[in-house]
Amino acid sequence: MSDLKNNNPNGRRQFLKNASIAALSVGLFPKNALSREQESQSTMACDPTTKDYYGVGPFYTENPPVRETTQLAKASEKGERMIIRGRVMNLDCSEALANTVVDVWHANDAGEYDNDGYNLRGQFKTNSQGFYSFETIKPGKYLNGAKYRPSHIHFKITPENEDTLVTQLYFKGDSDIPGDAAASITSGSFDATHRIIELSKNTEGKLEGVWDIVVNGKGGNIGTNDLHLDKGVIYSVSPNPFSDRVEIKYGIFHQAQVGIIVYDIEGKEVARVADSTLSSEKYEAVWTPEPGLPDGTYFIALKVNDLQIQYMKIQRLRR
Ligand SMILES: [Fe+2]
């Protein structure tokens, strides 16, 4: 915790000066001012979400219901249960987009759309931290000419006061992806690469997939907010991806109650790495995650006097 600590008053002044410049730079020039380490973190998994080549397709029904729960498919719906969740972020992934409308529709287990009603159709909204989540069934396949389209979910994503992105989500290992005119595109504006996600089975036997969406929009509820970077800053979180140990370097600019908190993709707190009153110094903390914590996306957040001023996204990936 303390090898970066410097109690020499001159050193401290120098640190404060450097820290303020660093904070200002991070706020004003998110990409240019980052260290190489931070840059690799911020560019990792921050690819703008692309449109799907097939656009909205023939099966969209206007005015779908706004779902009040995360259930899209009824409990009686035939098919393999599947949970899709993720976070909607702005184009440089520095802000989470709250209140984004995530409108989804897909075929049932037999590959048929409900074109009379709204079964397996609905709108969800991201929460204050930009997260969305819904439970449905894995869509069945249907013929498109002579070929089956791979299993897919249609999305219309509309951040507050921004344009709508129309796209589709596919699933890794689907044998119909290579032969599909849309899902097989690997470059350009219809590149589907980052829209083919891995599904894994959770302890309840349901499939689970994480899909983060990166679109044009304004957040500010959490994330790098330059109004607050005079209070403290996370300099680096490494390694990323991580396996069993994460080193977090951060600085505090005024004495304050400071927390380093780890959240999972749903915004649930999974660990509290630091929680104490700290004076203005540079600090280092180590997070050793529980072995049972699943691989996936996590967020390391810096809280100063209960104000979450910054977070960094990090992936757990064990070989
Ligand atoms: Fe479709």
Image (spheres, grey):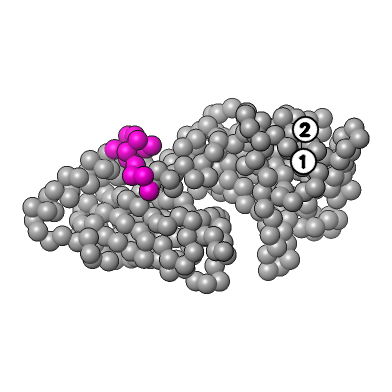
* 61 relative to 257, above or below: above
Specify the quadrant that holds the N terminus: bottom left
Instruction: From the top left corner, tell me how far across and down residue 137 is, in percent.
Output: 78, 53
Query: Is residue 62 at all visible to an observer of this figure?
Result: no
Instruction: From the top left corner, tell me how far across and down residue 233 is, in percent.
Output: 30, 50
Camera-side residue of 5 and 255: 5
Residue type at mark 2 is Ala
What is the distance, in whole Å, between disc 1 and disc 2 at their CAs? Answer: 8 Å
Camera-side residue of 317 and 66: 317
Q: According to the image, label 2 marks what residue?
A: 181
Query: Is residue 225 at all visible to an observer of this figure?
Result: yes
Q: According to the image, label 1 marks what residue?
A: 178
Tag 1 secondary structure: loop
Name the residue at 26% across, 49% down. 231
Is the C-beta separation of discs 1 and 2 under 8 Å?
A: no
**Other-residue count near label 1 (Cα within 10 Å), few / some / many at <14 / 14–19 / ≥20:** few
Ligand 1 has an atom within 8 Å of the beta carbon of the residue at disc 1:
no
Residue type at mark 1 is Pro
Q: Quadrant of residue 154?
A: top right
Instruction: From the top left corner, tell me how far across and down residue 289 is, in percent.
Output: 47, 68
Specify the quadrant that holds the C terminus: bottom right
Instruction: From the top left corner, tell me how far across and down residue 187 is, in percent.
Output: 63, 32
**Other-residue count near label 2 (Cα within 10 Å), few / some / many at <14 / 14–19 / ≥20:** few
Q: Quadrant of residue 24?
A: top left
Q: Quadrant of residue 112?
A: top right
Question: Which residues, given as a range, are shown in magenta?
Answer: 25-37
Name the residue at 85% across, 50% down. 109
Name the residue at 31% across, 57% down. 249
From the viewer's perspective, tell me whether residue 317 is left or right of residue 251: right
